Image: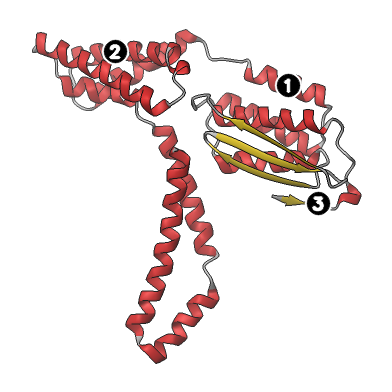
């Protein structure tokens, strides 16, 4: 959220087009691994740079809601449902961050902004590199956890299968959790059957290598980062009045009750942090 003196800001031209372009940037940031706080901050700063008096941005991994207030007092709200499965692409992330910084310092025309956003988001990774990366990750993890060379090779082959499923069937399944469960079940059964007919294989080593391609590690990383950030913010905003009251109460009702009050407040902060994790995973 941001408030700016309306007398010092020009009225943004084509505000609906501007907000739609900002939503495209926000969706692209989520798709390449940006955390929700960064996306909200980018929306706020860019909207303000282009003349908005106030920006209210609410972002989770599955939805974006933004209300932009113009100097005239008019509010424009747009909502977007995010169906694109999140990934990690630091090249695109850095390009979008650089674009947002340049726009905040010196706003560029909307046509040029839309053209640059389209150019950045059109740069998809080469399929061959994606397949090789999946095979390398699965095979190396199987070896790292004690598997043989044969286990690593089989894990790499199944890594290619998982990559194929993720690239061609993943976009058709909006619920990422359901897709991961179904694909993990199919691959897990296949690995178990291979180990049954080929006793020299170690199913546990192959499974632990291929499961690395299914686990929501990046989502867990973003969730943990958001949780820690919110915990730190909540702790810094921990009410001095409440703490002072609890300390004063100790002289009347005893230190045990006062400690209970403090513990209850700390548990409230922790519960708020965990609620953010469940919101992100939803």
Label 3: how many residues lie within 10 Å, few (<14), some (14-19) or many (20+)? some
Name the quadrant containing residue 96: top right
Q: Which label sits on residue 80?
A: none
For the question of whether residue 198 can be seen, the reply is no
Disc 3 versus disc 2: distance between alpha carbons? 54 Å
SS under mark 3: loop
Report x, y in % for residue 171.
48, 17
For the question of whether residue 206 can be seen, the reply is yes
Which residue position holds label 1? 116
Disc 2 versus disc 1: distance between alpha carbons? 38 Å
Looking at the image, which residue is at 84% across and 30% down?
14
SS under mark 2: helix
Residue 3 higher or lower than 45, as above or below:
below
Label 2: how many residues lie within 10 Å, few (<14), some (14-19) or many (20+)? many
Q: Is residue 202 left or right of residue 62?
A: left
Report x, y in % for residue 257.
35, 81
SS under mark 1: helix
Which residue position holds label 2? 158
């Amino acid at each position: 959220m941001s408030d700016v003196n309306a007398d010092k800001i020009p009225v943004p031209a084509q505000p609906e087009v501007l907000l739609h372009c900002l939503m495209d940037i926000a969706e692209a940031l989520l798709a390449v691994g940006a955390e929700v706080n960064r996306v909200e901050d980018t929306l706020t700063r860019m909207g303000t740079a282009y003349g908005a008096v106030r920006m209210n941005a609410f972002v989770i991994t599955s939805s974006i809601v933004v209300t932009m207030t113009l100097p005239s007092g008019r509010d424009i709200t747009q909502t977007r449902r995010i169906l694109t499965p999140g990934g990690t692409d630091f090249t695109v992330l850095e390009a979008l961050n650089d674009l947002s910084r340049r726009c905040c310092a010196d706003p560029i025309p909307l046509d040029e902004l839309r053209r640059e956003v389209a150019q950045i988001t059109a740069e998809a990774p080469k399929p061959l590199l994606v397949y090789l990366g999946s095979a390398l990750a699965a095979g190396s993890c199987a070896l790292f956890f004690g598997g043989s060379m044969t286990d690593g090779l089989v894990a790499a082959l199944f890594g290619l299968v998982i990559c194929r499923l993720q690239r061609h069937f993943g976009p058709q399944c909006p619920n990422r959790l359901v897709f991961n469960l179904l694909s993990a079940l199919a691959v897990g059964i296949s690995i178990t059957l291979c180990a049954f007919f080929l006793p020299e294989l170690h199913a546990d080593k192959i499974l632990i290598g291929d499961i690395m391609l299914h686990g929501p590690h990046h989502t867990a990383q973003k969730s943990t980062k958001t949780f820690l950030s919110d915990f730190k913010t909540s702790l810094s905003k921990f009410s001095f009045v409440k703490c002072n009251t609890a300390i004063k109460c100790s002289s009347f009702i005893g230190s045990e009750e006062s400690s209970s009050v403090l513990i209850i407040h700390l548990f409230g902060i922790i519960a708020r942090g965990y609620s953010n994790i469940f919101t992100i995973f939803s």
